[in-house]
């Protein structure tokens, strides 16, 4: 796996930035501003060669350094009653049932996947267009069993059996819940604001003392 650090983003800024300097011209102070073929602005006897920034490269290389961008973290405790049934096949014994109340802590990480093919960066007129996939869970939920209470117990279901079964159920249940949360408009809007803040920060840092960055446009695939 590639080593991905923000060092790559800093390198992108450095490579994308040109030089800035002043040259003296002999025109009179009343000479009107003009543009030369080299992109120089001439006014009051000075030639100002503006520093230019490849903003598209800055954003693309910064995103390529990441596998994903986490924008929203939700966490909390959940209390659920779980029913467990156990039987022994080919015996006359009835099915044994138990009910266990379980409390667990779960954390969800939502954001934008940034693997190859998950995003594009391009200029569109005077705008900088960043196209991404819609926010989703970017990691499996982190689940920790906090407490449990056996409310009803059966002959074939002892405490150890109940805990093993509960731990087997909790993770898939948390993942289903995470997919439901990812579809909420509040998660999508919060994620987009976080992405915009991140990208705007990169553009502002790269554009210090240079031409203003283009307008940032975010679209979904």
Image: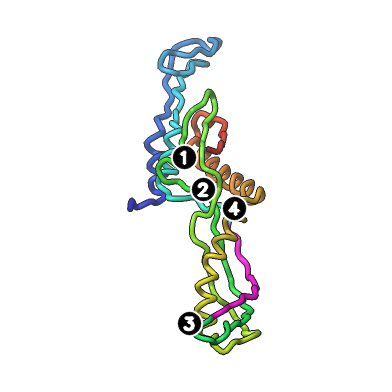
Circle 4 — which element? helix
Circle 2 — which element? strand
Q: Residue at x 55, y 38 (%)?
A: 220
Query: Number of labelled discs?
Result: 4
Quadrant of residue 18 in the image?
A: top left
Task: Give whichever of discs 1 and 3 has the lower sequence position.
Answer: 3
Q: Nearer the viewer, mark 4 or mark 1?
A: 4
Residue identifier under label 2: 112
- Residue 163 screen position, x and y as percent: 53, 81
Q: Closest to the observer: 10 or 114?
A: 114
Q: Quick check: marks 4 and 2 in contact, CB under 8 Å?
A: no
Q: Is residue 155 left or right of residue 13?
A: right
Residue identifier under label 3: 90
Rounded to the nearest whole Å, what is the CA distance between mark 1 and mark 3? 56 Å
Q: Closest to the observer: 133 or 102?
A: 102
Residue identifier under label 1: 119
Q: Which mark is residue 182?
A: 4
Colouring chosen for the image of the structure: rainbow
Rounded to the nearest whole Å, what is the CA distance between mark 4 and mark 1? 19 Å
């Amino acid at each position: 796996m590639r080593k991905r650090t923000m060092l790559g983003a800093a390198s992108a800024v450095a490579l994308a930035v040109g030089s800035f300097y002043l040259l003296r011209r002999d025109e009179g102070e009343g000479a009107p501003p003009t543009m030369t073929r080299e992109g120089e602005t001439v006014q009051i006897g000075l030639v100002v060669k503006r520093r230019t920034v490849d903003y598209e490269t800055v954003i693309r290389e910064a995103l390529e350094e990441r596998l994903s961008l986490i924008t929203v973290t939700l966490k909390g405790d959940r209390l659920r009653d779980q029913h467990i049934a156990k039987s022994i096949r080919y015996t006359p014994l009835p099915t044994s049932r138990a009910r266990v109340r379980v409390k667990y802590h779960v954390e969800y990480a939502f954001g934008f996947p940034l693997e190859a093919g998950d995003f594009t960066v391009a200029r569109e007129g005077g705008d900088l267009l960043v196209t991404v996939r819609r926010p989703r869970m970017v990691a499996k939920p982190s689940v920790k069993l906090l407490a449990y209470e056996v409310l009803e117990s059966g002959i074939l279901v002892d405490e150890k059996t109940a805990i093993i079964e509960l731990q087997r159920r909790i993770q898939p249940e948390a993942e289903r819940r995470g997919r439901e949360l990812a579809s909420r408009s509040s998660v999508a809007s919060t994620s987009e604001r976080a992405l915009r803040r991140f990208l705007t920060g990169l553009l502002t840092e790269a554009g210090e003392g240079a031409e203003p960055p283009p307008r940032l446009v975010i679209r979904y695939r």
